[in-house]
Image (cartoon, grey):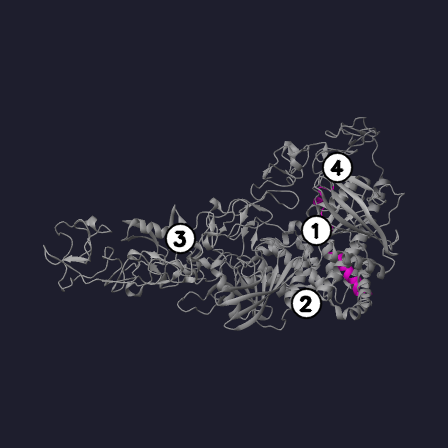
Amino acid sequence: MAELLYLTNTGLLTLFYFSLFCNQLERILAYHYWNHDISDSLQHSDGRWVPKRNCTEGKFGWRCLSICNCRHKRSCDPLTGACLEGCKNNFYGTNCLLKNKCMYDSRGITYAGSVAKSKTGKPCLSWEGQHGVRRDMFPDGKYPKNYCRNINMSADYAANPWCMVTSSEYEDCNITSCVCPEYWFGIGCKYECHCKKNDKCDINGICKSGCAAGWTGNNCQNRCKSGTYGDSCRNKCGNCKNNSCNPETGVCEQHCIAGFTGNYCITECPNGQYGRNCNLRCGNCRLDNSCNTRTGHCKYGCQPGFMGPTCKIKCANPHYGHNCSYPCGYCLKGTSCHHANGKCPNGCESGYMGENCRTVCEYGFYGQNCNMTCGWCVKGKEECHVVTGKCVNGCQKGYEGTTCAKAVVPSKKMSTTGAVVAALIASIVVVLVTFLVFHRYRRNQKVKHSSFRAGPDVVPDIPEENGRHILPTTHSSPEPSENGETDEPLYMNVNTKKMNSPVKIEDLYNYIQTNKANNTSGFRKEFKQLPEGLLAMCTTAQREENKEKNRYKDIIAYDHSRVHLDLVPGDPYSDYVNASYLDGYKREKAYVASQGPNKPMLKDFWRMVWQKNICKIVMLTDTVEASKKKCEKYWPDSGVEKYGEIIVENIDNAIFTDYIIRTFKLNRNENTRIVKHFHFITWSDHGAPMHPTSLLIFKRKVKLYNPNSLDPILVHCSAGSGRTGCFVALDYCMEQAKSEGIVDVLGCVQLMRTNRVNMIQNIDQYIFVYDALLEATMAGETTIPRSMFNETYQKWCLPNKDSFLSNIEDQFKVLYQLCQPVPRDEYRAALESENLSKNRFKNILPANRCRPYLYTMADDCNDYINAVFLPGYTRQIAYIVTQMPLPKTLADFWRLLYDHQSDTVVMLNDYDRNDKTCALYWPEEYGYTVEHGPLSIQLLSSSEIDPTVAVRVFQLRHVSKGEERAIKQFQFNAWPGMQKLPNTTASIIRLYNQVQEWLSQNGKGPITVHCMDGARRSGLFCAISAVIERMKVDREVDVFQTVKQIRVNRYQFIEDVEQYDFCYKVIQQYLNSQ
């Protein structure tokens, strides 16, 4: 008796017993294991191979070629053909294929039908109790009632099946010898044919067309040996575990060996992954985060703060940095410093300062973090003790005490005249301050603009430190809970009163500044007013049949606002999808807010798109974020993919810095539609983008496509609440601002939450909506179609009647109000003592988040260089901006080009041989080589294309690796030293064109741009290049948005209105010269 674990339609496991020889069952199981890819017939569970159902209903066997013969027309097991309720009338066998009056061997030894009469028509008697008949004489060990059988009662079997007609007599039964059913052969029809093209074999199993892939032998019953597959087993398996693949297709069913992935295990792990099936992520590796795909060992060593071959071990106190080779400084109370940068989290011990607490207090300061000032000490080499503040050389005259902070009180009292004078001076100061405040207030009330609404006047300056108002991406809120399933909705913090907080556009700047004060306490109070949790009935979403369609258990669709799908015949629950209608500004059902599809939702997602006539999909999540699945990929990268009845074809992919726009062609029953897929890719879950500009550009793209469509826009992130809520609120409030001159974020969010759970999930997202609205309303419309540029620019140069400022000047003023200096704490590496001398100017420093790290080792060098990455319009890293090399940073400059694959250098400053801080970084003679660490540089050619541009070509070689690259340098000679601007617009356009021509032919990687300070000139060139790039791609010009985006990484770019206006003039010249 053999036992098989059988998978029923409901997914429940049942023990099923088959009346067949054990070796036959083993053969079937082994066979179906090796055909796993064709029928997907088995899965491994608890050491056993369990059948899976994949044949269409009513079929079974190898390639589903046989038809079920079950009682009551039930389905059979897709592997064996076995029927739970038995075979239908007149059929028998384990697969119910054998006819009741037929035997399929010469003497009927394997006959197991239900004929119960002899040839003469006499009824057969039960086998049980007959003399000499035992259970073990029957194949399954059971008495077969009174059915005809051929059991061995003597030395040999009888010629035909027989039965007992009396207690002492037996007769043969009328059983006919028949040919096996199609696709089966052998004694008892136990074996399936395995022929090419699904051909039938003869009675001996011979295939005229030859054996199917994966099978060999005269009757095609031998599967390929381990390690081989395909026709005649000629192909070798890929890098499969145990060198074992599916013998028919080569699919590695036991997965891949370490370092490979894919069905066939011939694809090496992608960058950043390693191990078996590439399911492990590389540690904190340097350079491109690449590691050995098998072992995980980092090729180029570890990032700062990590150690070990896989770089997964954090530096242990008291060490940090590269290879954990730097000792921590003097952190307060001996606490650990940060494993990567060495920063002391709680400050320094008394007498030390700096983020790493390795710098002794400067002259005149002492105490914890050196924030105490020495008293009135007698000057000397050391004014006061850096720890205690004690004056080393005593006190100055008139002061006393250990720290000389106590003044010696004179014996006489202050004269009455002195007191009167002091009081009079104080009164005058109060009057002056009051007058200045009132005058400033009156002046601000008079400032009005037509297209650009500014807040308080801002005088452009370059402070070394200031706080940003636009919050960086954070992860302050937990992911939606997956606990607490309820049968009834929860009603939490419900405020039934309609909430609103309308703010006039002209007051928005001050409103935001006020509510951001004191750690954004005003906004936090406003946000807490909003109702949370489930606020309405959601019985459909909570049905057992629909639970798997919800990605998160507490982010589900309300009954009253959910999107209803047309029912699929036979499925009464197929109208549910986790998506909700949201109203727009003065427009019902303007949006569909959906979760990111999970696997059970894929077909429903496209059904929703088709049935609701959606032509725009806005996706605000990535499929995987922080190693967590956030959304199932529901589109093909190219070509065609089918989702239920909907065929989706990807016909275009337009890639930009922060987003991708895909064009899909949908086909259903010969009807076609076009759907645009707008995918924003730089917004992490539960956080907010670092600045609004890129999202505003993205939102404008969405708005411009099919603007007259009245069908809803489908918006989704992962849960369909946080990021989705931000996008919808921004779109809603911008329409409100345009129509009414106000924005009501609180009222908008409350309205959204009445239709979907927890729209806008946290305070950072809530504040971001305000920041985005501020930029959108203050800046106004800054995008000009290429065809209208000259006309629009001329208008913008004219002064406004109220302010006497031109639109260009208004834009620049708004730009300064919206752009905040990079906070000082982001300059950690630049301010470390070993790096301070590498900065030409102490107020132009790179933030850690956007600086390029150097990896190639060189003597006396670390990973720091004063440089920043900048985005273009279609690339995240299009430019590297740095300063003219100092004598001590020559090696760093060439390491920068080598490590970041930059083959293009644009030099915007003159080389002054008398300036000792200015280092000539290239050899001046042909064939001469200079070396910096492992890198050698040789001058190959030098020429002047025109009087304004000198061109040099260098060979950059890594000596130990033998790698060589050509580097082309463009030195711009039309920008005299003290001028703010180049000599002409035409000259910088020629420079731009020459750089682009080189890039189109040979250039790789980002363009490295430098001037003396790495800001004033470099920022102008990069801004102009990015504006032209956008104009070429989208045939539109937006100087404001481009400059704002690059100023996020370096505040000193485009510092005056002359440079800002020059960008417009260059575009005008560029268009006129076309």
Residue segment shown in magenta: 804-830
Instruction: Give the x, y percent position of residue 841.
Output: 80, 44
Looking at the image, tell me whether mark 1 or mark 2 is earlier in sequence order.
1
Secondary structure, mark 4, is: helix
Decide if residue 208 is on the left or right side of residue 975: left
Three-letter code, disc 4? Glu
Q: On the image, numbered disc 1 is attached to which residue?
A: 468
Give the Cα separation between the discs numbered 1 and 3.
Answer: 76 Å
Q: CA distance from mark 4 to mark 1?
A: 27 Å
User: To which residue does mark 2 refer?
Assistant: 741
What residue is pinned by disc 3?
Answer: 217
Q: CA distance from mark 1 to mark 2?
A: 26 Å
Task: Give the quadrant of the C terminus.
Answer: bottom right
Q: Residues within 10 Å of mark 3 (few under 14, many from 20)?
A: few
Nearest the viewer among 891 and 605 is: 891
* Residue 592, quarter of the rendered image: bottom right
How many numbered marks are there? 4
Other-residue count near label 1 (Cα within 10 Å), few / some / many at <14 / 14–19 / ≥20 = few
- 75 vs 454, left or right, is left
Q: Position of residue 217 (x, y in %)?
A: 40, 53
Depth check, mark 1 against mark 3: the one in front is: 3
Residue 977 visible somewhere in the drawing: yes
Q: Which residue is mark 4?
A: 834
